[in-house]
Image: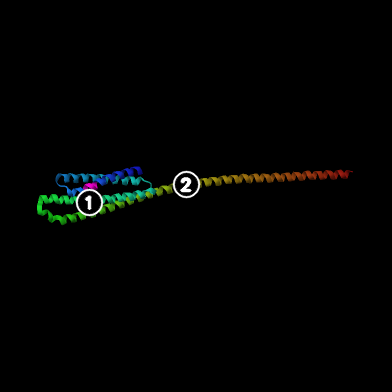
Amino acid sequence: MSSDFETYEQDFGTITAEVTNKIGRIPKLSGEEKTQLVLNVDKQLEEVRELLEQMDLEVREIPIQSRAMYNSRLKSYKQEMEKLEKDFKRSRIAYSDEVRNELLGDDASSSENQRAHLLDNTEKLERSSRRLEAGYQIAVETEQVGQEILANLHTDREKIQRARERLRETDANLGKSSRILTGMLRRIIQNRILVFILGAIVLLTIILAIYFNLRGH
């Protein structure tokens, strides 16, 4: 995934360098050449937006432990994109003013404040949109983290259940072994008592035999 992100980074750097150069040339040109350059820059800026979207998707697929670094890089690219768009708007407004002045003459200068106000409102709307997008990304990342935590909890729960089952089996085996040992110990005691009784009987028999033998003499 990171290799794809770095490829997008290289494309981003190449295109933004071209766009920066062309934006600086717009005020110096005139006529059809300037019109074509404005259209070309607008098209390249759209390509840059698509690259940022692709990078955003790639970042979401990167493991959480490595995601912060790529998020930081993506944020700086978005800030660079915002600056390019502002610079392009300024150059395009200057270009529009030139065209309008050519068509309307002195009447065009009276709407300069209105255009500046419109540009300011447009930038405010764009900032609000970017904040909403950032909030959405945070919500998505939070959801992903929550899902991973739930998955880890589910895995831990299964491990605990398996450990409990093994513990029950061990307890059952220990109980069975205890019963077997108790039975064996009981039989050993019984055998020893039996041997003791038999020994006593034999000993008593010998004593009686000796007694009667001595008495006969």
Whether the residues at callouts 1 and 2 have beta carbons within 8 Å, the answer is no
| SS assignment for the magenta stretch, majority | helix
Q: Residue furthest right?
A: 217
Tell me, yes or no, whether the highlighted magenta stretch contains residue 132.
no
Along the line of sight, the residue nearer the viewer: 192 or 132: 132
CA gap, disc 1 to disc 2?
58 Å
Is there any visible trace of residue 1 in the rendered image?
Answer: no
- Residue type pointed to by label 2: Lys
Classed neighbour count for the residue bearing mark 1: other residues with Cα under 10 Å, few (<14), some (14–19), many (≥20): some
Picture residue at 34% right of the left edge, 46% below the top: 59
How is colour applied across the structure in the image?
rainbow
Task: Say what secondary structure mark 1 lies in.
Answer: helix
The residue at which mark 1 appears reads as 87
Magenta part of the chain: 19-23
* 195 left or right of 119 in image: right
The residue at which mark 2 appears reads as 159
Along the line of sight, the residue nearer the viewer: 172 or 26: 26
Q: In this rendering, which labeled residue sits more in front, label 1 or label 2?
A: 1
Q: Position of residue 34 (x, y in %)?
A: 17, 46
> Quadrant where the N terminus lies?
top left
Picture residue at 73% right of the left edge, 44% below the top: 195
Q: How many marks?
A: 2
Q: Position of residue 15 (x, y in %)?
A: 26, 45
- Residue type pointed to by label 1: Asp
Task: Say what secondary structure mark 2 lies in.
Answer: helix
Picture residue at 38% right of the left edge, 49% below the top: 145
